[in-house]
């Protein structure tokens, strides 16, 4: 009996060791590229090419960032990305939750059909819409404007779905009380239901922010003038165009760091909402 | 005039959904209808596609993809071949990796769950463009990966310039075929204007880097889905099987995996749907090069329209892609119905 238990104990220790080994190994695989990215952006160009694996920049220089801000359109791209991302995020949170609330709670004719339509639209793959979206924007005379960057994606079926699911999960009693007090549907929605929806609203805000901040293809089909480039678009151009001589890796990686930072900060602060968002996506 | 409560709720309901209906209608539904028309024309991007001067060509744009011998079909079939290998490798690998990581992270003996979960998930939330830049640097010919390989005495390839197919390399390495002089019965013909030899190339070395990148970025999301499902498995069930004397592998095989089946299914279909749409990485990292081995239907439809001004061909390709994805979605729904019944 004793030997059996000792054997068992040894096996537990061994499998704990193997478990940690796997976790640490993959943590390195998943995170070390970011370390390389960050450190290379503070290296000199020859140094970045010579010691790509070394996490410590020696010498430590900020030339890449100076250059990113002074010799590229980075300030413009950042500004455009901010405008577009904020507008889309606000729009999605408001419009998706209005629609989600109506689909969950208000009894109106055609509700079921509308919800089926939302589900159908969820299944439309984004890449299929590249050229079609361009056609519509051209037809409406919106092509190459801020409106083109924002309006077509200011509401999304996925967000409507998440909000509908959420509103269905909260008890009706609160709304009924408001209704008995004589509040109309809008008042009930705005001052009673929405405040209760905080967790879902934060989740939606975060996934909207993240997806519109990172969005590349929509920008490709909506605008062409460099004045309207968002950060991912500007970064893509920066990478494909040979900016002067050499590979300019510190510069490109520095620009990529700037594109990563906002989402990284939000990720660290609101991680559990990201997790929730990923799993809501799964319920579709 | 006072409306009845029912009528008021009806109006309120429509007002609440109106903005979303307008946006989705104008920018999802209408575009699809317009594109269906354009895919039947030879519109070159000048003026409106609905003017009378635009040549109507019927299903020519589609037959150019499948039956007419020519560059368009060759490019399209090459892109389909590339994407088939891409889906066939990325989906199983990312699913197994996600499941494995979820099982290890979920293990009750290990601490630091929160940190490792966050570490594995982080790549999924970052910008695909930014990540592509990082991978361009890491896989550069004197980059981090080749440095690491050199440490083990392996000379790494010129990743992004290497158009050689992996399958060709393997077959050549095993001595089954001579890569420089492939057998005539393979090169002489094959379906859809591409020789058997070309179909059997496998993903190129350059494409492999994009596959690695995508596996690396998406495994985290799928791991979270597996984790959520694992946490839903009742502890009593596992304890019961332990009391029954089931070892770890038996428990995994007969208790855990069957409970994960719906999630596994979902992860596979979501994976298939998204891998057929690979675009951003190709756009940033390779633009279809080298030797068209990273060309994908999504990227090809984009370049056909916006670089070659062949809007008809471009939209036709996107509808074929649409059909492929819808087919997989229907198969998924159908299989799920079987399961629920």
Image (spheres, coloured by chain):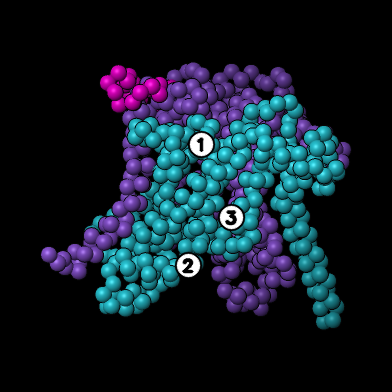
Q: Is residue B20 left or right of residue A60?
A: left
Nearer the camera: disc 1 or disc 2:
1
Crowding near pointer 3: few (<14 within 10 Å), some, many (20+)?
A: many
Residue range (magenta):
B43-66
Most extreme residue toward the bottom is A1
Instruction: Give the chain coloured cyan.
Output: A
- Residue at the location (64% across, 42% down)? B130
Q: Secondary structure at mark 3?
A: helix
- Taking depth in this image into account, of B259 and B17 the one nearest to the observer is B17
Q: Which mark is residue A34?
A: none
Q: Which mark is residue B222?
A: 3
Q: Which residue is identified by label 2?
A: A198
Is residue B284 among the parts visible in the rendering? no
Same chain for the residues under marks 1 and 2 in the image: yes
Q: Which mark is residue A228?
A: 1
**Do tag 3 and tag 1 residues touch (Cβ < 8 Å)?**
no
**Figure quadrant of residue B43:** top left
* Rendered shade, chain B: purple
Same chain for the residues under marks 3 and 2 in the image: no
Q: Is residue B299 above or below residue A272?
A: above
- Residue at the location (60% across, 41% down)? A75
Crowding near pointer 1: few (<14 within 10 Å), some, many (20+)?
A: many
Most extreme residue toward the front is A70
- Where does residue B271 sit, x and y in percent of width and height? 55, 48
Nearer the camera: disc 3 or disc 1:
1
- Where does residue A23 sit, x and y in percent of width and height? 74, 59
**Figure quadrant of residue B11:** bottom left
């Amino acid at each position: 009996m004793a030997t059996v238990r000792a054997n068992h104990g040894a096996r537990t220790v061994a499998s704990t060791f193997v478990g940690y080994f796997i976790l640490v190994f993959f943590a390195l695989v998943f995170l070390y590229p970011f370390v390389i990215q960050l450190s290379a952006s503070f290296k000199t160009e020859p140094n970045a090419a010579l010691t790509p694996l070394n996490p410590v920049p020696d010498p430590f220089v900020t030339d890449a960032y100076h250059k990113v801000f002074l010799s590229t359109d980075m300030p413009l791209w950042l500004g455009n990305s901010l405008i577009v991302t904020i507008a889309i995020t606000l729009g999605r949170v408001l419009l998706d939750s209005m629609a989600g609330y109506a689909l969950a709670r208000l009894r109106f004719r055609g509700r079921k059909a509308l919800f089926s339509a939302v589900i159908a639209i969820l299944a439309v793959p984004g890449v299929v819409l590249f050229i079609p979206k361009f056609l519509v924007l051209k037809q409406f005379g919106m092509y190459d404007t801020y409106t083109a960057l924002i309006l077509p994606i200011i509401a999304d079926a996925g967000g409507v779905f998440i909000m509908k699911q959420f509103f269905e999960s909260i008890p009706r009693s609160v709304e009924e009380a408001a209704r008995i007090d004589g509040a109309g549907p809008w008042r009930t929605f705005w001052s009673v239901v929405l405040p209760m929806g905080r967790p879902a609203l934060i989740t939606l805000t975060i996934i909207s922010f993240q997806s519109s901040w990172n969005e590349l293809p929509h920008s490709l089909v909506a605008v062409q003038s460099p004045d309207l480039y968002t950060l991912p678009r500007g970064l893509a151009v920066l990478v494909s165009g040979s900016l002067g001589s050499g590979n300019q890796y510190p510069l490109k990686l520095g620009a990529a760091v700037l594109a990563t930072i906002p989402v990284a900060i939000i990720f660290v602060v609101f991680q559990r909402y990201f997790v929730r968002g990923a799993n809501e996506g799964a319920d579709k | 005039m006072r409306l009845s409560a029912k009528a008021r709720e009806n109006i309120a309901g429509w007002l609440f959904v109106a903005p979303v209906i307008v946006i989705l209608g104008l920018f999802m539904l209408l575009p699809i209808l317009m594109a269906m028309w354009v895919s039947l024309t030879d519109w070159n991007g000048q003026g409106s596609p609905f003017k009378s001067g635009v040549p109507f060509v019927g299903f020519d744009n589609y037959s150019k993809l499948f039956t007419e011998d020519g560059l368009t079909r060759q490019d399209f079939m090459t892109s389909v071949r590339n994407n088939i290998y891409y889906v066939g490798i990325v989906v199983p690998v990312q699913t197994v990796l996600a499941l494995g990581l979820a099982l290890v992270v979920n293990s009750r003996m290990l601490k630091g769950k929160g940190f490792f979960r966050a570490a594995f998930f982080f790549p999924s939330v970052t910008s695909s463009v930014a990540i592509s830049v990082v991978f361009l640097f890491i896989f550069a010919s004197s980059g981090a990966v080749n440095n690491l390989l050199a440490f083990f005495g392996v000379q790494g390839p010129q990743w992004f310039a290497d158009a050689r197919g992996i399958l060709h390399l393997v077959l050549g390495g095993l001595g089954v075929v001579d890569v420089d002089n492939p057998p005539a019965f393979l090169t002489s013909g094959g379906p859809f204007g591409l020789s058997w030899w070309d179909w059997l190339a496998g993903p190129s070395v350059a494409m492999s880097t994009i596959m690695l990148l995508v596996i690396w970025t998406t495994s985290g999301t799928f791991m979270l889905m597996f984790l959520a499902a694992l946490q839903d498995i009742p502890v009593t069930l596992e304890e019961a099987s332990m009391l029954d004397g089931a070892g770890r592998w038996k428990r995994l095989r007969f208790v855990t995996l069957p409970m994960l089946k719906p999630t596994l299914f979902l992860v596979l279909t979501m994976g298939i749907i998204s891998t057929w749409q690979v675009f951003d990485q190709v756009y940033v990292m390779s633009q279809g090069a080298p030797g068209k081995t990273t060309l994908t239907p999504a990227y090809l439809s984009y370049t056909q329209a916006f670089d070659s001004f062949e809007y008809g061909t471009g939209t036709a390709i996107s509808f074929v892609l649409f059909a492929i994805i819808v087919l997989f979605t229907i198969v998924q729904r159908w299989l799920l119905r079987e399961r629920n019944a």
